[in-house]
């Protein structure tokens, strides 16, 4: 979340200041997405990002604290996007009357994979292994949480077989994302998505 600066204000002036602060943060984050995707984390510099954003080094450090924090903010933004895509699809399926846990899971997985193609530049960056120290540990922790959420959606029990099934299905989606973000075309990405859905149905059934 962006931080407020200066004296406390209210009304239109306060709203304008908050809007401007949010906009600056958004522009810096989009510039980081472009620079990190083009150069990788290690080779990208703060100067590259602020030049692309048309901002200043001071503004970047104010909003993010540095290059590492900027990368992690980009990762968190991607996590939020993934969860919104999947969550919206699951809610829509429920609203349409679907109550089968596997079909709800598939609705979320399909949306997740379609979103992976839409933001494939970020996907390639985050899967490349080129991140700040400690990022792999954060990513493993997020993967464990992803398995937990999928277990709840699938209404899985605590048997060894059910835990294994959820872990395998989650891994299938993760590996499908790896292939989709490097696909040569949207058609290929769509075929990979449908193949993944078919595999989930076989394994989940």
Image (cartoon, rainbow, N blue to C red):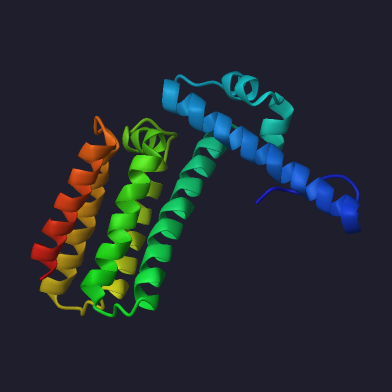
Q: Quadrant of the C terminus?
A: bottom left
Residue 5 pos. (x, y %): 82, 45
> Which one is in front, 90 or 29?
90
Seen in the picture, residue 191 relative to 61 is either above or below; the reply is: below
Residue 49 image position (x, y, % from top left): 59, 24
Horizontally, residue 135 falls left or right of residue 71, namely: left
Does residue 47 appear anywhere in the picture?
yes
Of residues 96 and 35, the one nearer the viewer is 96
> For the point 25% across and 49% down, which residue is it?
174
Q: Is residue 64 visible?
A: no
- In percent of the image, x 77 and y 42: which residue is there? 20
Q: Is residue 67 above or below residue 18?
A: above
Task: Where is residue 7? Give x, y as percent.
Answer: 91, 49
Which is nearer the eye, 6 or 17?
17
Left or right of residue 63, residue 199 in this image: left
**How far from the left and from the top, in percent, is residue 83?**
42, 58
Find residue 27 and report its image quarter.
Answer: top right
Residue at the image point whose x is 71% and y is 37% from the top: 62
Q: Quadrant of residue 119?
A: top left
Number of marks in picture? 0
């Amino acid at each position: 979340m962006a931080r407020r600066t200066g004296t406390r204000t209210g009304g239109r002036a306060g709203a304008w200041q908050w809007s401007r602060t949010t906009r600056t943060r958004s522009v810096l984050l989009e510039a980081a997405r472009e620079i990190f995707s083009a150069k990788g984390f290690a080779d990208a510099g703060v100067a590259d990002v602020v030049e692309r954003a048309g901002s200043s080094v001071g503004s970047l450090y104010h909003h993010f604290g540095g290059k590492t924090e900027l990368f992690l903010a980009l990762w968190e933004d991607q996590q939020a996007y993934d969860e919104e895509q999947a969550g919206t699809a699951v809610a829509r399926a429920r609203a349409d009357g679907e109550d089968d846990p596997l079909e709800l899971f598939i609705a979320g997985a399909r949306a997740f994979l379609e979103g992976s193609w839409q933001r494939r530049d970020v996907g390639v960056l985050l899967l490349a292994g080129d991140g700040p120290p400690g990022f792999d540990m954060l990513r493993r922790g997020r993967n464990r949480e992803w398995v937990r959420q999928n277990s709840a959606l699938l209404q899985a029990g605590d048997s060894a077989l059910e835990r294994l099934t959820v872990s395998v299905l989650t891994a299938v989606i993760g590996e499908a994302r790896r292939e989709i973000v490097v696909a040569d075309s949207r058609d290929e990405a769509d075929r990979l998505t449908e193949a993944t859905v078919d595999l989930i149905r076989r394994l989940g059934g």
